[in-house]
């Protein structure tokens, strides 16, 4: 299996621009997670989906952030407008039944975002 | 709410030294516990896990035992290698209303010198 695929791997954008991060989960997985990693705050769960439905978006920082999962094989995380404090590594992850009963969550390699 | 606390880092060791990274948790019910590892420039990957009290997870020479009485899941390795240099995350899933999500600790940076 190809694993969780994220794009772009690296993105440098100017403040105020729209940023769209993309994720293709592992085929057959019913959970999809978006995490953000920074030195200051560590690893934060932004939002997660079960069968394409958002379950918990309480980690989304503010209205500038939005996430969609139009089908089982694709999800996007959008930031509009972007700000320098959004600079971070954004990870997408997927799994079968989430971490329930000890199931493994598989992470992508991350999208490294820099907002200047 | 659910939480995970890891020992402060970074941790710096010489090759073949013994490693312990402490992890304690707070959760309702009986959580599943995990250690994930992140190598430089990569995403996180599962290192080991345990799903019930007294279970021992092990992989690549690393071990951790689920201690319900002390709410701990400390990571150990008897002899570390340079290739073990990475960030280590302790995590839990408490089931119930947390559904499938993982709650992570803050991560511990490990550097192993030759």
Image (spheres, helix red, strand yellow):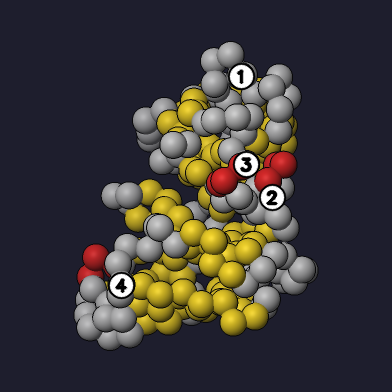
Please identify, in this view, whether the residue under mark 3 or under mark 2 is nearer the observer: 3
- Quadrant of residue B33 within the rendered picture: top right
- SS assignment at label 3: loop
Residue at x-position 67% and y-position 78%: A73
Please identify, in this view, whether the residue under mark 1 or under mark 3 is nearer the observer: 3
Q: Which mark is residue B68?
A: 1
Q: CB under 8 Å between callouts 1 and 2? A: no
Query: Could you tell me which chain the residue with mark 4 belongs to?
Result: A
Disc 1 crowd, CA 10 A, few/some/many (<14, 14-19, 20+): some
- Quadrant of residue A102 within the rendered picture: top right
- Quadrant of residue A49 within the rendered picture: bottom right
Q: Is residue A9 above or below residue B4?
A: below
Residue at mark 1 shares a chain with residue at mark 3: yes
Q: Earlier in the sequence, mark 4 or mark 2?
A: 4
- SS assignment at label 4: loop
Residue at x-position 62% and y-position 33%: B31
- SS assignment at label 1: loop
Q: Residue furthest bottom?
A: A17
Residue ID for mark 3: B95
Residue at mark 3 shares a chain with residue at mark 2: no
* Residue B59 visible in the current orientation: yes
B16 vs A34, nearest the viewer? A34
Distance, label 1 to label 3, CA atoms, is: 16 Å
Q: Which mark is residue A63?
A: 4
């Amino acid at each position: 299996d190809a694993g969780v695929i994220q794009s772009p791997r690296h993105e440098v954008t100017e403040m105020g621009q729209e940023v769209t991060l993309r994720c293709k989960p592992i085929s057959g997985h019913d959970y999809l997670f978006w995490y953000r990693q920074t030195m200051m705050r560590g690893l934060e769960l932004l939002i997660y989906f079960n069968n394409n439905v958002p379950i918990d978006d309480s980690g989304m920082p503010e209205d500038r952030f939005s996430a969609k999962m139009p089908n089982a094989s694709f999800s996007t995380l959008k930031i509009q407008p972007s700000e320098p404090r959004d600079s971070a590594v954004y990870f997408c992850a997927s799994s079968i039944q989430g971490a329930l009963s000890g199931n493994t969550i598989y992470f992508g390699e991350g999208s490294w975002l820099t907002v200047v | 709410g659910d939480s995970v606390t890891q020992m402060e880092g970074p941790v710096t060791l010489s090759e073949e030294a013994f490693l312990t990274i402490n992890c304690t948790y707070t959760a309702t019910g009986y959580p599943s516990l995990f250690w994930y590892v992140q190598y430089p420039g990569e995403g996180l990957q599962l290192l080991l896990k345990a799903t019930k009290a007294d279970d021992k997870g092990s992989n690549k020479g690393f071990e951790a035992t689920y201690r319900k009485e002390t709410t701990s899941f400390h990571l150990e390795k008897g002899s570390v290698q340079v290739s073990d240099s990475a960030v280590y995350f302790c995590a839990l899933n408490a089931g119930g209303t947390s559904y499938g999500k993982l709650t992570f600790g803050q991560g511990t940076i490990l550097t192993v010198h030759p």
